[in-house]
Image (cartoon, helix red, strand yellow):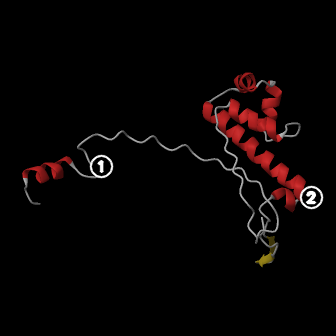
């Protein structure tokens, strides 16, 4: 978000580098732009989760405790009328864990920021089988046991 707003001309087409927050670029004040950016990110995650679970809008409405037209609004990224807290509650109702990380600001960063990240769940690790090493073929293990050389 601290990127400079420089205008680059390429082939007579002026291009302005964005700030990283579209709402700031559109002229909203910093505080409002930050909130809108967070709400947009949360709404996008709600959309992704409803799609991933294969829910219809009616099923999602029942799960979230809202009307189907409200789910339709969320599915079309229209989050006005929903607080950030309510959007977070929708995500937990869709079986997602939410971690909030607080850390001191860097001195070189002029403004504070709030970001929404989605982390894919890790694949479950396979259980360890005694006597079997990963990455070693059965043939190599058999040769090692018998003392044969390759």
Residue that carries the numbered disc 2 in the rendered image: 29
Secondary structure state at the residue bearing disc 2: loop
Which is more toward the observer, 58 or 142? 142
**Mark linked to residue 3:** none
Q: Is residue 4 above or below residue 26?
A: below
The answer to whether 80 appears left or right of 49 in the picture is right
The answer to whether 123 appears left or right of 116 in the picture is left
Q: Is residue 124 above or below residue 17?
A: above
Instruction: Report the quarter where the N terminus lies.
Output: bottom right
Residue 70 occupies quadrant: top right
Residue 138, percent from left and from top: 19, 47
Residue that carries the numbered disc 1 in the rendered image: 134
Q: What residue sits 74% from the left and 33% below the top?
A: 90
Secondary structure state at the residue bearing disc 1: loop
Instruction: Report the quarter where the C terminus lies.
Output: bottom left
The answer to whether 80 appears left or right of 10 in the picture is right
Q: Callout 1 environment at 10 Å: few (<14), some (14 to 19), or many (20+)?
A: few
Residue 78 in view of the camera: no
Q: What residue sits 89% from the left and 36% below the top?
A: 81
Residue 120 occupies quadrant: top right
Closer to the chain start, of discs 2 and 1, is 2
Q: Callout 2 environment at 10 Å: few (<14), some (14 to 19), or many (20+)?
A: few
Residue 16, percent from left and from top: 81, 70
Q: What residue sits 73% from the left and 67% below the top?
A: 106
Q: CA distance from mark 2 to mark 1?
A: 55 Å
Q: Is residue 44 above or below residue 113?
A: above
Residue 93 in view of the camera: yes
Q: What residue sits 69% from the left and 51% below the top?
A: 101
Which is more toward the observer, 119 or 70? 119
Which is more toward the observer, 131 or 72? 131
């Amino acid at each position: 978000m601290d990127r400079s707003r420089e205008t680059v001309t390429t082939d007579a087409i002026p291009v302005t580098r964005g700030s990283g927050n579209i709402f700031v670029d559109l002229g909203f004040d910093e505080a409002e732009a930050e909130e809108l950016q967070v709400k947009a990110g949360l709404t996008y995650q709600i959309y992704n989760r409803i799609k991933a679970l294969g829910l219809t809008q009616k099923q999602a409405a029942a799960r979230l405790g809202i009307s189907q037209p409200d789910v339709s609004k969320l599915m079309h990224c229209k989050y006005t009328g929903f607080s950030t807290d309510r959007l977070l509650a929708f995500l937990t109702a869709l079986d997602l864990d939410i971690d909030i990380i607080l850390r001191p600001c860097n001195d070189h960063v002029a403004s504070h920021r709030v970001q929404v990240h989605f982390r894919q769940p890790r694949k479950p690790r396979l259980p360890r089988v005694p006597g079997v090493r990963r990455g070693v073929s059965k043939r190599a293990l058999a040769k090692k046991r018998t003392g044969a050389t390759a």
